[in-house]
Amino acid sequence: MPINIPETDKERIVVVGAGFGGFMLARKLLKSDYQVVLIDRNNYHQFQPLFYQVAMAGLEPSSIAFPLRKAFQRSKNVHLRVAEMEKVDTTAKQIQTDLGVLNYDHLVLATGAVTNFFGNNEMEKHAYSLKSIGESLQLRNAIFEDLERALVTRDYDERQGFIDVVIVGGGPTGVELAGALAEMKKYILPKDYPELDQKEVDIYLIQSGDRLLPGMSEKAGRKALQFLEELGVTVKLGTRVTAFNGELVETKDGQSIRAHKVVWAAGIVCDKIQGVSETCFAKGNRLCINEHLEVAHLNDVYAIGDAASLTSDEYPYGHPQVAQPAIQQAKYLAKQFKTGKKGNGFTYRDLGSMATIGRNKAVADLNKRSLTGFIAWAMWLFVHLFALVGVKNKLFVVLNWMWNYFTYDQSLRLIIKSEPKKGNV
């Protein structure tokens, strides 16, 4: 059954995914000569770099999300559908979704990536990840629920399971989350949970490689390690987590850590798209694309963002799976659609990398120059605030940041759970 989309004489561009790439592409095609259909499983665009702050009760979920219908409410050529793509038929030029079939003239796959558990089903079952606002709220609930349980737990070992946290992965997500947890331990626990001895709370950051932030400079990695150790985080480098049953974390070197909460930030992978030939995929299930962002061996199918792999001498494994490549690719592709002509080929402009570790502590690599400390932290705040969608979101975030900075307080420490639906009496 076809999805109900108004029929026009305009060519139809179907964009799958409303992340950084898909959302930017749809915005750039406003008032164009195309009919644009944007589909996503959510009815909002979410700002992924700040998921960890939602999990740490520093920001409201609504302040890092923007309703898609609000973004396109004045556009007559952009149509939105909350749906999930199930399969692509490149011969018939249509996609199958959970709502029905949707025909396309041009298909843009901006499907993003999900957490990669590397086949560890036990870890996938028990560990937390941070790839959506929903997952951020789950982690926030778990942290504060376990703190409440710890208050009534007399046994020391059992209590450690409730209050200790293990983070696996030393990239930006793991580093930023570890720093935020350490600040919560330092500033929040003594006020909210005076009956708990904060010295009992241990935060572990486990990285299989020999340094933190492997995608950044060695100086940034060393400084991040220094900042985290100053905050009291136990950093274990060259250590691989092999198992987690919900209570004990096991490492390859035989160590055991009692913790009920493991946050897995050790890698991402793309979901395989059904109906697309195996020859179109690269490592990590990314779609092989050419310099015009066209998927290899397919006609009128494009890929941008995390789902796309454009290799070169400088990027033999494709561009980094972060926001900027997706945004730049979306702008390039939009221009290509609007002009009807292929450009000179997409070239990624690396604007740098940043990671914040806590109050006045951050690292930044910009134009082969590495900055650390307060300057890097201030730049991180400005860049992320500027990138948020919506004036109201920017205002709410800056107010929350100011409140947290001057009061040493995170004001959103709420345990919010959905109530079971009641039947008819």
Image (tube, helix red, strand yellow):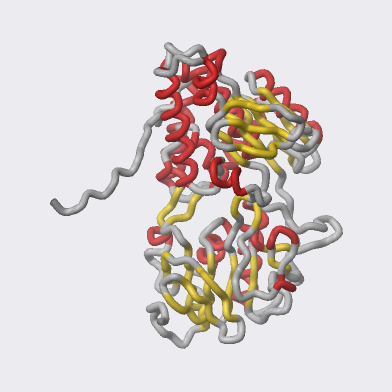
Left or right? Give the position of 316 relative to 147.
right
Left or right? Give the position of 346 relative to 245.
right
What residue do we see at 66% from left, 27% from top? 256
Is 302 or 198 nearer to us in this picture? 198
Residue 392, x across and y down, in percent: 40, 45
Q: Examine the rendered structure and indicate whether residue 35 appears above or below residue 138.
A: below
Count all numbered tags in the image, as a single digit: 0
Report which quarter residue 328 is drawn in: bottom right
Is 396 or 284 nearer to us in this picture? 284
Q: Do we see residue 50 in this rendering?
A: no
What residue do we see at 64% from left, 23% from top? 233
Q: Do we see residue 376 in this rendering?
A: yes
What residue do we see at 42% from left, 16% from top? 193
What residue do we see at 72% from left, 23% from top? 226
Residue 77, x across and y down, in percent: 44, 74
Residue 245, x across and y down, in percent: 58, 37
Residue 131, x across and y down, in percent: 55, 48
Outermost residue, right side: 313
Outermost residue, left side: 425
Q: Examine the rendered structure and indicate whether residue 363 appears above or below residue 406.
A: below
Report which quarter residue 202 is drawn in: top right
The N terminus: image quadrant: bottom left
Report which quarter residue 370 is drawn in: top right
